[in-house]
Image (cartoon, grey):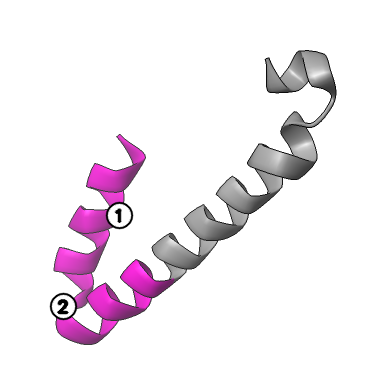
Amino acid sequence: MFTALGIYAESFEKPFLECTSEFYAAEGVKYMQQSDVPDYLKHVEVRFS
């Protein structure tokens, strides 16, 4: 529906991608501070799968 109205990119996609980026950036910082490298990499692997 958003796509048909031509508002998908501005009204949904852009805010969604910004929030997603902020979430994963904060999560990455948290895991880097609280974990050692092997545990951090395991977490990253889980997120990618």
Question: In terms of secondary structure, what is the magenta stretch mainly?
Answer: helix
Callout 2 amino acid: Ser
- The relative height of residue 36 versus residue 1 in the rendered view (above or below) is below
Residue 14, given in percent of the width and then of the height, sits at: 70, 48
Check if residue 35 falls in the magenta segment. Answer: yes
- The residue carrying pointer 1 sits among few (fewer than 14), some (14 to 19) or many (20 or more) residues within 10 Å by Cα, namely few
Q: Nearer the viewer, residue 5 or 35?
A: 5
Side of 44 relative to 13 (left or right): left
Residue 45, given in percent of the width and then of the height, sits at: 27, 47
Q: Nearer the viewer, residue 34 or 20?
A: 20
* Marking on residue 35: 2
Q: Nearer the viewer, residue 27 or 45?
A: 27
Q: CA distance from mark 1 to mark 2?
A: 12 Å
Q: Secondary structure at mark 1?
A: helix
Q: Are marks 1 and 2 in contact (CB under 8 Å)?
A: no
Q: Which residue is mark 1?
A: 44
Quarter of image, res 10: top right
- The structure residue drawn at horizontal position 30% and vertical position 34%, both measured from the top left corner, is 49
Residue 46, given in percent of the width and then of the height, sits at: 23, 44
- The structure residue drawn at horizontal position 49% and vertical position 54%, both measured from the top left corner, is 20
The mark that comes first in sequence, 1 or 2, is 2
- The relative height of residue 17 versus residue 27 in the rendered view (above or below) is above
The magenta segment is: 26-49
- The residue carrying pointer 2 sits among few (fewer than 14), some (14 to 19) or many (20 or more) residues within 10 Å by Cα, namely few
Callout 1 amino acid: Val
State the residue lying farthest toward the right: 6
Q: Which quadrant holds the N terminus?
A: top right
Check if residue 21 falls in the magenta segment. Answer: no
Side of 14 relative to 10 (left or right): left
